[in-house]
Image (cartoon, helix red, strand yellow):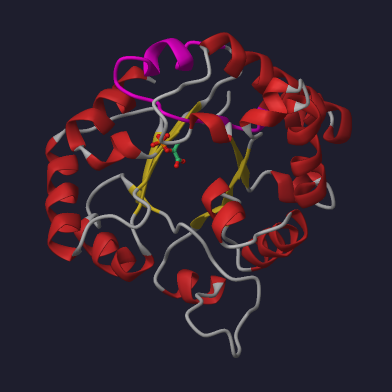
Amino acid sequence: MRTKIVAGNWKMNNDLAETQTLIEQLIQQGDFSNKRVMIAPTAVHLSAAKSALSASKIEVVAQNMHQAEAGAYTGEISGKMLKGIDVNTVILGHSERRAYFGETDAILEEKVAAALKQDIEVIFCFGEELEDRKAGNHFEVVASQIKNALFALDAAALKHIILAYEPVWAIGTGETASPEQAQEMHAFIRNLLAEKYGEATAQATSILYGGSVKPNNAQEIFSKADVDGGLIGGASLKAEDFFAIVKSL
Ligand code: PEP
């Protein structure tokens, strides 16, 4: 059975006091079972979040990392640094990183390899732009993003990758892919994995949906056979909303 996951991407939100308050509120929401729940605060607050959640099952993950092990890369954070504070999962390939920070498939391929080398699990994000969907190219775009960044990996390495399909037109827009659109794409992705890695690997890989998931639409999206959870942006900033989404899974 695939692991069910809800991950909250806090992006560049929350100062330290707000981070601590939100974490306290999350802890108060209570326990959960049979799924992984993660939060991704800004890198500056990863250590504080780890301490605050030391007795909780909620996992702390990073929003990004650099592909080099160390060196003259001002302002960047390495996988080794994340590992050093016991952060064992990183989000890579988010559409905001691709759009605003020039992250290409080639860079992402390097970042994925660098994370896996440090034994850091990857939540790998990808998804088409609105023009791609309108032009009917969305399957092609998604397939090339996945193939270019991931298909050099072998099946053993792929076990450390969580996929997150995030159509760019649905991120932070209030526009959600319909549950049918999400299922159609997730089934396509699983089939792509099956062709490359075999059915067992494809069936074991968690594929999350991201893009304006809210408490009022989460259950329907999560009910789809190939949707194994969600990557949540805006709604992860409110403990009650985030946990309502966690409970929908
Ligand atoms: C995201 O940024 O990964 C995301 C899914 O954002 P939102 O939920 O706000 O659309």
Which quarter of the picture shows residue 113?
bottom right
User: 246 or 15, which is in the foreground?
Assistant: 15
Q: Quadrant of the N terminus?
A: top right
Which quarter of the picture shows residue 118?
bottom right
Which quarter of the picture shows residue 192?
top right
Which residue is found at the position 59% from the left and 52% from the top? Answer: 99
* 148 lies above or below 197: below
Classify the position of ligand 1 by quadrant: top left, top right, bottom left or bottom right: top left
Residue 190: percent from left, percent from top = 73, 25
User: 154 or 188, which is in the foreground?
Assistant: 188
Which residue is found at the position 41% from the left and 66% from the top? Answer: 86
* 166 lies above or below 213: below
Relative side of 144 to 14, left or right: right
User: 89 or 178, which is in the foreground?
Assistant: 178
Which residue is found at the position 65% from the left and 22% from the top? Answer: 186
Residue 244: percent from left, percent from top = 25, 24
Q: Quadrant of the C terminus?
A: top left
Residue 74: percent from left, percent from top = 51, 85
Magenta segment: does it hold 148? no
Relative side of 132 to 90, left or right: right
Relative side of 132 to 192, left or right: left
Which residue is found at the position 28% from the left and 30% from the top? Answer: 32
Magenta segment: does it hold 212? yes
Start and end of the magenta stretch?
Answer: 204-224
Residue 102: percent from left, percent from top = 64, 61
Relative side of 170 to 10, left or right: right
